[in-house]
Image: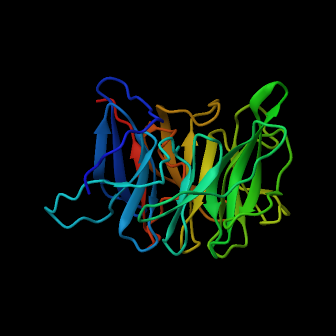
Amino acid sequence: MTITGTGTNIRPLAPGQRARLLVADIDGGEPRVVHETAGTALEAPNWSPDGRWLLYNHDGLLFRIPADPAPGDGAGPELIDAGGITDANNDHVISPDGATIYLSAGDGHIHAVPFGGGAARRVTNDHRPGPFRHFLHGVSPDGGTLAYVGVEPWNGDEWGYRNIFTVPAAGGPDTRLTDTPAPADGPEFSPDGEWLYFNSEHGAAAPGHAQLFRMRPDGSEPTRLTGDERVNWFPHPSPDGRHLLYISFPPGTLGHPADQDVLLRLTTPDGGGHRDLLAFNGGQGSLNVNSWAPDGRRFAYVDYPTS
């Protein structure tokens, strides 16, 4: 497919900087570069459930590229028709059956588009008073429920109140799972659907000191999983349920900014210790959404080298 279209959600890179889509193995070895860009950033890979594709966003558009191209075939990115949406951000997931992409767009809503491209369907509801923004992160194992971060005005800041909600993937009423000024983000379902994993500043001694948590899908049994000096974001359960992959920022980081000295770490589903896998220049866009391969051994991520 010829790449056409113009995106409207563009993240510039610094002069000489690149964005590289890579695949790594939890057992180590040199990560493999799948694709790279210069000038503007690509972000947030998903791995398709059938193992064939990596999905990512670039300049507000969605692309897919073969995850394991045959040697010498030169397969490049394919633009996905997202029904006219040109301002997708780095919050998107693929349904468990591989048929649908759910994405967050610049209008603040979550939309559904066919994986092969086609008309977009808005999933989420209007909230009053506004503004209210939906940032998608998880889909339940049965494909019936989406987990997202709802951003509401608080204390004079329209981005100040960030809590976790669910909504039926087919459309329907929202369910609020957290209701606290402590920011929360990145909710994802465990493979068995028994837990939602997320990061939160609940109980933090300093602003920005996010740690990993989990709770039941009805919001009960919230439990902190990490408690170290680093700032930990975006826990991604592996398909086999054995691991959590997450991105760890330097102490004192506020939010999940770009161009930081980050670590990718592995821990158990109950937070029992951690193992450092990779260190690189990255952050925003590197690991925002679940990027595990179906085999539970490999994962995709993005780094942003400056040389």
In this view, 12 is above or below 120: above
Name the side, left or right, on which 5 lies relative to 90.
left
Please give the name of the residue rendered at 39% of the width and 37% of the height, measured from the top-left corner: 41
In this view, 179 is above or below 29: above
Which quadrant of the figure contains the N terminus? Answer: bottom left
- Spot occupied by residue 306 in the image (x, y as percentages of width and height): 33, 29
Q: Is residue 6 visible?
A: yes
Q: Nearer the viewer, residue 180 or 281?
A: 180
**Residue 214: quadrant of the picture:** bottom right
- Spot occupied by residue 181 in the image (x, y as percentages of width and height): 84, 38
**Residue 11: quadrant of the picture:** top left
In this view, 191 is above or below 159: below
In this view, 159 is above or below 178: above
- Spot occupied by residue 53 in the image (x, y as percentages of width and height): 37, 64
Q: Is residue 227 visible?
A: no
Q: Residue farthest to the left?
A: 72
